[in-house]
Amino acid sequence: MLGIDECLLESMGLPGVRGAAVVDWTSGLALGTIGDSPCGDHETTAAEAAEFARTAAEHPAFVAGEVDPAGLLPVEDVLVTARTGYHLLRFVETTFDSSLFLYLWLDREQGNLAMARLRLRDLAQRLVLG
């Protein structure tokens, strides 16, 4: 089990990771950050990434027909591909409101997107809040 700081430190060990954060997608606030931010400001990055997360989690085009009886989010992760990097958002299932996601910014040339998705899934499962 990992706390926020340990989770973020472990995420920085992935090849090509430039920065990472744990973000509340309902408020857009970063609960923890590490490394660089694509725009130079972690809070702005968190707020902008939260907009993507909210759209993916709440928009009918992404979740239609995938209602989970336990109330879990049907969307697991969101990927944005840019010319120089990848932005990966992984939703974290929690016992309370499941409004958190892990954000990872990867360098496109040095990062391994497939490995990052798998490791981020593992980190999200091991993250303990409280």
Image (spheres, rainbow, N blue to C red):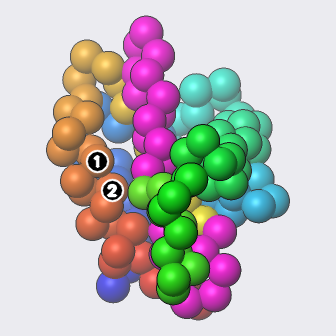
Q: Is residue 102 above or below residue 128?
A: above
Q: Is residue 53 above or below residue 27?
A: above
x then y, percent, for residue 43: 74, 45
Q: Which residues are magenta?
A: 77-99
x then y, percent, for residue 41: 71, 35
In the picture, the quarter occupied by the N terminus is bottom left
Magenta-span inclusion, residue 84: yes
| The quarter of the displayed image where residue 15 is located | top left
Rendered image: mark on residue 117 = 1
Is 16 left, or right, of 128 in this rendering?
Answer: left
Amino acid at pointer 2: Leu
Q: Residue at x 32, y 20 (%)?
A: 108
Is 71 left, or right, of 109 in this rendering?
Answer: right
Amino acid at pointer 1: Arg
Q: Residue at x 35, y 24 (%)?
A: 107
Q: Residue at x 68, y 54 (%)?
A: 58
x then y, percent, for residue 2: 38, 79
State yes or no: discs 1 and 2 in contact (Cβ < 8 Å): yes
Give the class, few, some or many, for how many residues have Cα within 10 Å of label 1's Cα (few <14, many ≥20): some
Q: Which residue is mark 2?
A: 120
Q: Secondary structure at mark 1?
A: helix
Q: Residue at x 18, y 44 (%)?
A: 115
Q: Is residue 82 above or below residue 69?
A: above
Q: Secondary structure at mark 2?
A: helix
